[in-house]
Image (cartoon, helix red, strand yellow):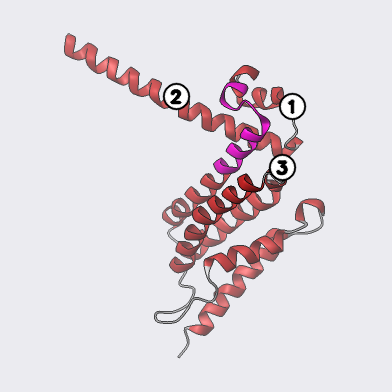
Amino acid sequence: MAHVDEGRSGDAVRRTAGRPRRSGQDLLSAAAAVFVSSGVDAPVREIAAKAGVGVGTVYRHYPTRAELVVAVYRHQVEECADAGPRLLSETGDAEAALRAWVRLFVDFLVTKHGLADALHGQAAGSDALHAHFVDRLVPVCGALLDAAALGSPGAPPALDAYSALKGIGNLCIGAASDPRYDADTLVQVFVTGLLVGAAGTSRP
């Protein structure tokens, strides 16, 4: 009986240990959704209601709005980074995975632009977040570009991952303030250009 009790106790400890991380992720996802719909100055009570927690829980995790914004930004970057290998595995089609990931990246740039804007004026924090953005997303983009065979063996790719992400970012500028501006379609045309360009470089 003692052995069974110990097993149950271990299971309970593992379940309890997993809850804070999961609840923290749920809180950040809820905050991100509220920021998109109501802006980064949305009332904390709205975020708490979306997450299904009390206002005190939000403040306990993130005493200031700036801390919450930084955490949401990092959370969104991590979700975008994690999506790359997952899409590649799930689709089994490198080009389809690349295009699906690029759509997620565009959504991140267009809908989460307020997060970066809210951090302006905090130079050190902004620089650190930009470095985190580059460190996490450029390798993911590079892996997807490589998997989609952009370029050819022994030849440089049509465009390196950093330049590709920079180009996509430039195409997304202004999209949030102009409902007629279809950033996603423009970016997909850009991706098609990368694919065509890569095919051209691979010809003898």
Q: Is residue 142 above or below residue 77?
A: below
Q: Which residues are magenta?
A: 59-75
Q: Which of 181/14 is in front?
A: 14
Instruction: Look at mark 3 in the image and give the residue it sits on.
Output: 118
Q: Based on the displayed image, in which of its 4 quarters is residue 168 positioned?
A: bottom right
Which of pointers 1 and 3 lies earlier in the amino acid sequence?
1
Q: Amino acid at mark 3?
A: Ala
Percent coordinates x, y for residue 116 in the rendering: 68, 47
Q: Amino acid at mark 1?
A: Pro
Seen at 58% across and 21% down, the residue is 60
- Residue 89 at least partly seen: yes
Q: Nearer the viewer, mark 1 or mark 2?
A: 1
Residue 19: which disc? 2
Q: Which of 64/99 is in front?
A: 64
Report if residue 201 lies within the magenta region: no
Seen at 50% across and 51% down, the residue is 81
Instruction: Look at mark 1 in the image and give the residue it sits on.
Output: 43
